Image: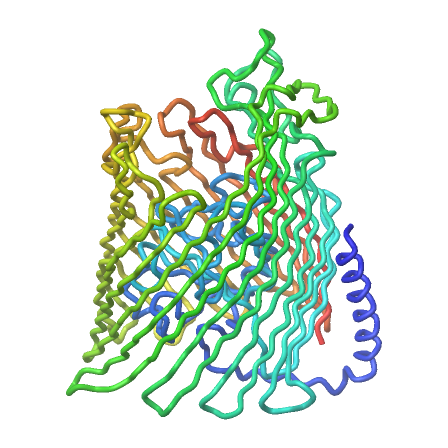
């Protein structure tokens, strides 16, 4: 365990002992206030059903009135499911392929509506590249995680056509609350975490929060450990009723080895004369491999109301990240990659990189509320700016110097004599101005917006690439008095594409367009919401081989995704929470110059997804406070781009048992309860990605 992790464990244990002793003396004086503050887009939500969000509009808006499908995963749901990663949090969300590439310690993999999605933290873009840019977030630091489905460039600029996953950090609360937990689990998991919030020194305008976490664990793959240290302080200052400033900081370090082992088709889903490759096989080198990331976030969220009709908001964040990635991974990238006649031995590549990344994000907007006759307006005018810089030193060899026997791996000294080194520097800049109006007339709500962006991509040794894009979104919702809200919307996205065609012309951005038709239903007075949505998305200007020279690409490719989503979220009573969803995703390569993929389902995307999860509180005799939860997830089969191999469908069961007793909460969670071995996906280049095995976590939490 690293030094910071050890110190964090010590601090948490000392705090737990001292606070438990103090609580014994003052426990009789504790008072519980059942009154809940008005919900806001960043506030605590009791249960599973949030009513309001800012992700889809950047204003404090009713989800029922939003003309686009959106899900909110609350801290209560995260805690009851004991999710340990963002992709685990998303497992029960409609339209989301959450474990797209199975267990991967380097990053969270997911797709929305069969398309790439973009991840944000507090409304500011978090990820611009893969693996080495920033730390893998921990759900314990989040108050809620929101999924906005479909193109979202009108508000956020360049991004994936699938949608947005916005992580909302825990923030200071006005009431004093404290909790400390210890978690123990299989794979030798040991974890301590704590969350403290409340006024600073009995003031009425200064509030703090401190989130701490330390973890030491192995994983289902031999030698691939998982250590984490997280420290996230925040401070809110409210000098008046009209002004609020929240400072947000976070330090996080992840230390381990990469879990993906790039296992070949033969021995996983296809027969091999030597039998099945054990799923815990490590084909790298434990003495050489590592994946260590470290990130520091510093930022703020400011809101000032000039009067009852005009508000100014500013969100800003600076992120500095380092990544040390060393991997010896097998050459599984063909239908028959074995280099011996017995089909046991694979070559391995040496891949080494050290990356330093710095990101600055700034989003400013004015919100004006006014009326024109019978029409009420919420007008939003914004300007945002993002700058991402990355310096990288990398080394790579030809993959012939370090063979390994897949069925009897021996970790010999790694030969790095063939490694070729290079250094690179890149910078991405984006500036966008946007205008949105939410117009209300009786029971109708019209949402309309337009945005203009300039995106600049600078890569060392290449010509600077500038892209300009205008994106729009329009939506209309009818909100009936009985809780029904049918809607229709149109939205666009753009994503810059680096590189040139065979004539030297710069590639244009990919362009996404979506039509969505749906209905939401919230029974009046309840904390229940049902959503049904049908959608049609086209992702255009995708690269496809140039028929004149296949070594180059042209932008005539297209992916067409159509589907249906059903989702229900409910806190039926104070004793029952449940969620359920079903998705049908027909995502195909509709235009391509590669006949082998034409008309095929998009790689890694199953057509059918279904899930349901419920938690019931109950009593046994005179003992109250018991909780039991059960979840079922169905993941349909998926295939590679060329329909050569198919990953079978699978049904997984999750479960939870808990007891709330006094100031303590005891919980036992199990995901993939029956420990099914399954393949998340196999891709066309020749390798397979494995689904997460059974994970059992027992926890004890003390509240005061």
Q: Nearer the viewer, residue 290 or 475?
A: 290
Q: Residue at x 32, y 65 (%)?
A: 432
Please provide percent x and percent y for residue 378. Answer: 28, 79
Picture quadrant of residue 294 = bottom right
Please provide percent x and percent y for residue 330. Answer: 58, 25
Q: How is the image coloured?
A: rainbow
Answer above or below: position of 443 versus 28. Answer: above
Picture quarter with the C terminus: bottom right
Q: Is residue 588 visible?
A: no
Please provide percent x and percent y for residue 690. Answer: 55, 34
Picture quadrant of residue 41 = bottom left
Answer above or below: position of 462 versus 262. Answer: below
User: As drawn, which residue projects farthest toward the top?
Assistant: 341
Q: Is residue 20 left or right of residue 570?
A: right
Q: Is residue 605 visible?
A: yes
Please provide percent x and percent y for residue 255. Answer: 68, 48
């Amino acid at each position: 365990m690293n030094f910071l992790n050890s110190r964090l464990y010590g601090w948490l244990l000392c705090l737990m002992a001292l606070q438990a002793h103090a609580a014994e003396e003052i426990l009789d004086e504790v008072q519980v206030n059942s009154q809940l503050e008005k919900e806001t887009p960043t506030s605590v939500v009791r249960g599973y059903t949030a009513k309001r969000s800012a992700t889809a509009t950047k204003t404090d808006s009713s989800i029922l009135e939003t003309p686009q499908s959106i899900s909110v995963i609350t801290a209560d749901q995260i805690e009851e499911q004991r999710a340990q990663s963002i992709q685990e949090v998303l497992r029960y969300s409609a339209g989301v392929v959450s474990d797209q590439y199975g267990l991967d310690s380097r990053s969270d993999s997911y797709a929305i509506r069969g398309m790439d999605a973009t991840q944000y933290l507090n409304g500011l873009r978090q990820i611009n590249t893969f693996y080495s840019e920033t730390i893998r977030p921990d759900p314990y630091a989040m108050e809620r995680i929101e999924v906005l489905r479909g193109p979202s460039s009108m508000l956020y600029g360049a991004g994936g056509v699938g949608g947005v996953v916005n992580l909302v950090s825990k923030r200071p609360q006005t009431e004093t609350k404290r909790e400390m937990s210890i978690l123990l689990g299989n794979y030798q998991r040991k974890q301590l975490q704590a969350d403290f919030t409340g006024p600073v020194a009995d003031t009425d305008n200064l509030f703090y929060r401190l989130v701490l976490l330390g973890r030491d664990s192995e994983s289902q793959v031999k030698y691939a450990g998982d250590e984490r240290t997280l420290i996230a302080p925040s401070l809110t200052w409210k000098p008046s009723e009209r002004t609020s400033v929240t400072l947000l900081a976070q330090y996080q370090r992840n230390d381990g080895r990469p879990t993906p082992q790039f296992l070949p088709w033969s021995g996983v889903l296809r027969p091999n004369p030597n039998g099945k490759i054990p799923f815990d096989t490590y084909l790298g080198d434990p003495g050489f491999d590592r994946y260590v990331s470290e990130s520091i976030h510093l930022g703020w969220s400011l809101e000032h109301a000039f009067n009852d009709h005009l508000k100014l908001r500013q969100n800003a964040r600076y992120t500095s990240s380092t990544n040390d990635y060393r991997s010896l991974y097998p050459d599984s990238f063909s239908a028959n990659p074995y280099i011996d006649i017995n089909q046991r031995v694979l070559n391995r590549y040496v891949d080494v990189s050290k990356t330093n990344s710095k990101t600055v994000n700034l989003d400013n907007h004015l919100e004006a509320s006014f009326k024109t006759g019978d029409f009420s307006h919420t007008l939003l005018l914004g300007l945002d700016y993002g700058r991402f810089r990355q310096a990288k030193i990398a080394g790579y060899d030809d993959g012939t110097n370090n063979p390994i026997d897949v069925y009897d791996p021996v970790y010999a000294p790694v030969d790095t004599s063939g490694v070729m080194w290079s250094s690179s520097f890149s910078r991405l800049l984006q500036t966008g101005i946007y205008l949105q109006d939410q117009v209300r007339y009786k029971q109708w709500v019209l949402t309309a917006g337009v945005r203009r962006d300039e995106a600049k991509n600078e890569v060392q040794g290449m010509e600077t690439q500038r892209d300009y894009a205008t994106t729009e979104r329009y939506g209309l919702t009818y909100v009936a008095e009985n809780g029904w809200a049918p809607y229709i919307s149109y939205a666009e996205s753009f994503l810059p594409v680096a590189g040139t065609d065979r004539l030297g012309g710069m590639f244009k951005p990919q362009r996404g367009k979506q039509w969505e038709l749906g209905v939401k239903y919230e029974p009046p007075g309840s904390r229940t919401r049902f959503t049904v949505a049908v959608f049609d998305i086209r992702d255009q200007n995708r690269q496809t081989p140039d028929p004149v020279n296949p070594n180059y690409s042209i932008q005539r490719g297209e992916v067409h995704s159509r589907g249906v989503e059903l989702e229900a979220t409910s806190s039926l009573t104070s004793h029952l929470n449940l969620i359920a969803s079903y998705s049908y995703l027909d995502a195909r390569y509709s235009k391509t110059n590669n006949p082998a993929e034409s008309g095929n389902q998009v790689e890694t995307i199953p057509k059918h997804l279904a899930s349901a999860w419920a938690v019931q509180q109950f009593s046994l005799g005179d003992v109250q406070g018991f909780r039991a939860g059960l979840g079922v997830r169905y993941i349909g089969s998926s295939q590679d781009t060329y329909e050569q191999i198919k990953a079978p469908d699978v049904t997984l069961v999750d479960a939870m048992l808990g007891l709330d007793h006094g100031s303590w909460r005891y919980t036992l969670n199990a995901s993939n309860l029956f420990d099914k071995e399954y393949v998340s996906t196999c891709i066309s280049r020749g390798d397979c990605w494995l689904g997460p095995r059974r994970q059992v976590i027992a926890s004890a939490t003390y509240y005061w």
